Image (cartoon, rainbow, N blue to C red):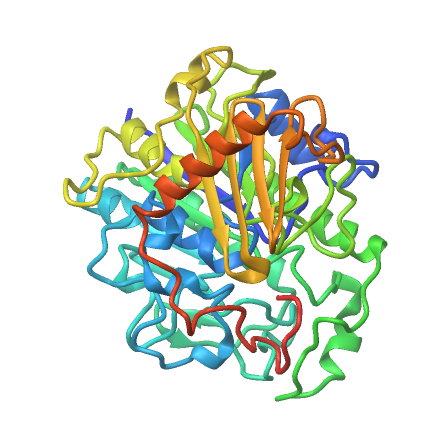
């Protein structure tokens, strides 16, 4: 049987918000069940500490820095209509490669990789799309941060009543149920907006609708840890429905389901013991949960310490599907199929990051992490000091110098960050995205 692929992406979810990662509230019984039935990664990372750059890497399987649009941290609603800032339609993607291999492909949820008419999911390999095109949108009015309505179906603006998390779940379940009746394998990219701000639960319907049509939503408005946790639970309920649809369709055994987040948590994330969050290259900003359920191949109830990053999922899924990557666009990631079958089989490799925000750079190699924030440089033993409290730069100057040099060599292989790029006026003012 061909392998189906479901990739579930949360938005701004912290590494330790889930029960299976030590979370302090019972918000994720279905994701926790996925972990019990599959493989959990303890050293999974996002390609960026902010939304759209990670999504470039997820789409292409390559360091996002290779594409101009990913230099924005992130793409903001002010970029509507821009012909440069987005995922170029001629660039091969996971969706386009699987579509060429005979897969039915759907993106249900957040796109955040550029705006029409130049960019869209349908131009980058997806047969179907339902969801918002920008970053943060209200869960009930479906308006972006400037008050612009942002809910689309296959390129056409649509209006739907309902809580956005539930609307995405319903469409995903419908897609899987339809796919189960077909012999065609599928890729479902289910990109929830939860628990990204505005922090609204299902019970906040009347309050949200009282804002009115065209009213901007603001990052600093409202929210609390209880609402944040309820939003995660709403998403988890939807994932439970999706897993049930796989069982009902008789295709669970041959479907690989991956759950992760696009970057670290934000204001209400209960991310102990990590420090930092979204927009930081500290562990709290880039370490994310990776939970994989694949009854046919992945060993149940196992844990791997494999160093992994978002862009690894493209070669992983292509290999699982028996599909070929585009020869002119080799992946910067590695396939993780070996680790899913044998979680103790570890592949050594370095990982690199850079951000214009606070002139950050980072590198991971084994247990060592090099970090630079503005003019400050650090060296951490991330295995024994995951809170990044003990700067070992003076104790190990040679190791620091080696990692600095390795980062510089890697950076020289990437296009430079354009001077005009940076943190956009995404929310009507320069504010945390």
Quarter-of-image position of residue 429: bottom right
Residue at image location 44% in from the left, 71% down from the top: 152
Q: Quadrant of the C terminus?
A: bottom right
Residue with the most extreme left position: 327
Q: Nearer the viewer, residue 392 or 255?
A: 392
Residue at image location 61% in from the left, 53% down from the top: 375
Q: Nearer the viewer, residue 10 or 245?
A: 10
Residue 85: % across, % down: 36, 70
Quarter-of-image position of residue 358: bottom right
Residue 256: % across, % down: 43, 30
Is residue 119 shown left or right of residue 219? left
Can residue 139 be seen in the rendering of this structure?
A: yes
Residue 153: % across, % down: 41, 69
Can residue 178 be seen in the rendering of this structure?
A: no
Residue at image location 42% in from the left, 50% down from the top: 175
Q: Is residue 281 placed above or below 309 in the rendered structure?
A: below
Residue at image location 60% in from the left, 38% down from the top: 287
Q: Quadrant of the N terminus?
A: top left
Q: Is residue 90 placed above or below 316 in the rendered structure?
A: below
Residue 156: % across, % down: 37, 76
């Amino acid at each position: 049987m061909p392998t189906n692929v479901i990739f579930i992406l949360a938005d701004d979810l912290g590494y330790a918000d889930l029960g299976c990662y030590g979370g302090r509230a019972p918000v994720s019984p279905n994701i926790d069940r996925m972990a019990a039935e599959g493989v959990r990664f303890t050293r999974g990372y996002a390609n960026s500490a902010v939304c759209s750059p990670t999504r470039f890497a997820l789409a292409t399987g390559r360091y996002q820095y290779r594409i101009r649009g990913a230099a924005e941290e992130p793409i903001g609603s002010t970029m509507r209509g821009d012909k440069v800032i987005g995922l170029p339609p001629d660039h091969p993607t996971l969706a386009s490669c699987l579509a060429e291999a005979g897969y039915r492909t759907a993106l249900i949820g957040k796109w955040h990789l550029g705006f029409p008419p130049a960019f869209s999911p349908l131009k980058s390999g997806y047969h179907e799309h339902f969801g918002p095109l920008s970053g943060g949108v209200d869960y009930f009015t479906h308006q972006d941060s400037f008050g612009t309505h942002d809910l689309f179906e296959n390129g056409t603006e649509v209006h739907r009543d309902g809580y956005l998390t539930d609307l995405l779940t319903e469409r995903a379940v419908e897609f899987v149920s339809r796919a189960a009746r077909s012999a065609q394998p599928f890729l479902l990219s289910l990109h929830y907006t939860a628990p990204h701000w505005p922090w609204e639960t299902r019970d906040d319907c009347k309050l949200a609708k009282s804002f009115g049509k065209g009213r901007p939503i603001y990052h600093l408005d409202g929210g609390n840890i209880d609402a944040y946790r309820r939003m995660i639970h709403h998403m988890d309920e939807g994932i439970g429905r999706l897993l049930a649809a796989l069982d009902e369709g008789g295709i669970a055994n041959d479907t690989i389901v991956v759950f992760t987040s696009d970057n670290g948590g934000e204001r209400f994330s209960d991310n102990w013991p990590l420090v930092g969050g979204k927009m930081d290259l500290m562990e709290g900003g880039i370490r994310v949960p990776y939970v994989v359920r694949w009854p046919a191949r992945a060993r149940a109830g196992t844990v791997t310490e494999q160093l992994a990053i978002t862009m690894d999922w493209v070669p992983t899924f292509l290999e699982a599907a028996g599909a070929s990557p585009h020869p002119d666009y080799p992946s910067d990631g590695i396939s993780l199929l070996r680790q899913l079958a044998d979680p103790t089989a570890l592949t050594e490799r370095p990982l690199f990051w850079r951000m214009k925000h606070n002139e950050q750079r980072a590198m991971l190699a084994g247990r060592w992490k090099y970090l630079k924030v503005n003019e400050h440089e650090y060296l951490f033993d991330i295995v024994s000091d995951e809170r990044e409290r003990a700067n070992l730069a003076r104790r190990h100057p040679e190791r620091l110098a080696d990692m600095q040099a390795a980062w510089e060599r890697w950076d020289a292989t990437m296009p430079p960050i354009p001077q005009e790029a940076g943190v956009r006026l995404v929310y009507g003012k320069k504010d945390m995205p």
